[in-house]
Image (spheres, grey):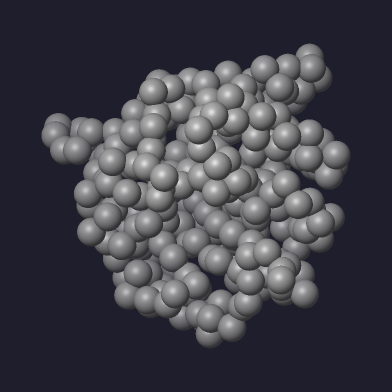
Amino acid sequence: MKKEKIIIANWKMNLSYKESLRYIKDIKSFLVGLKNIKIILCPAFVSLADIQKEIKLKKIELGAQDVFWMEEGAYTGEVSVQSLKELGCKYVIVGHSERRGFLNETDAMINKKIQIVLSHNIIPILCIGENLEQRNDNLTAKILRDQLLEDLKIIDFKNNQQIIIAYEPIWAIGTGHEATTDQVNEAVIIIKSQLAKLYPNKDIEKSFKILYGGSVDENNVESFLDLDVIDGFLVGGASANKVHFIKLLNKIKN
């Protein structure tokens, strides 16, 4: 039986509120018909409530692009995990490379976010990855291990809970460089090995899902479909264009 693929559509800041609703109404019937694919939509905060009303379907779930690490308080502009939960979010992206790079988000901040997300029984989607300089200096393994060590520090979770790890090679995102299947395979092996060290008493395959997220689109997704070490894809810009996203999904389902 074909293994179900997890596809996370991170729309980033590409669609307005009205555009988001129009988008989901246009492709909802297509998404419902997909087999062996779980879709997790991550629109902007302002669209979450109305997107949720449109996707009350088993195979389409809702995620948020970020969260704050405190329950409530004087944190202007931030969004609490309780608010996300009440809106129906089952997933939250944490530590995306753009937040690490543009907003100076640290591993300590990411660690606190994972703690609060898990405490509300929401699944964190932890993004990790190295930049081009680090890869060229043969530091990929060290960067991935260090990020996992710091991001998952003192993180424990119940056996019925899960964490998604998205491998995002920063050097392959919007740069024109593409990761090879061998490079992705090597990185995922490093990730799984480190997870096994951090959680020796857990079933790693069950407790963690590993996704690839290096500028995945309809032109390169097929090259990664036979990689058994990954469970799906974190799709950024390509997911915000319904034509490109449908083409990508068609290639995954075939």
Residue drawn at (46%, 80%) of the image: 25
Vertical placement of 169 versus 198: above or below?
below
Where residue 192 appears, as percent x and y from the top left, is 65, 34
Q: Spot the residue most to the left.
A: 73
**Quarter of the image with the C terminus in it:** bottom right
Examine the image and state in which quarter residue 174 appears: top right
| Camera-side residue of 21 and 145 | 145
**Quarter of the image with the N terminus in it:** bottom right
| Camera-side residue of 76 and 148 | 148
Where residue 144 appears, as percent x and y from the top left, is 63, 25
Where residue 180 appears, as percent x and y from the top left, is 85, 42
Residue 225 shows in the view: yes
- Tell me if 222 is positioned left or right of 156 in this view: right
- Tell me if 190 is positioned left or right of 226 in this view: left
Residue drawn at (69%, 49%) of the image: 230
Vertical placement of 20 versus 111: above or below?
below
Vertical placement of 122 versus 104: above or below?
below
Where residue 55 appears, as percent x and y from the top left, is 41, 75
Residue drawn at (55%, 42%) of the image: 203
- Number of marks in the rendered image: 0
Residue drawn at (60%, 51%) of the image: 234
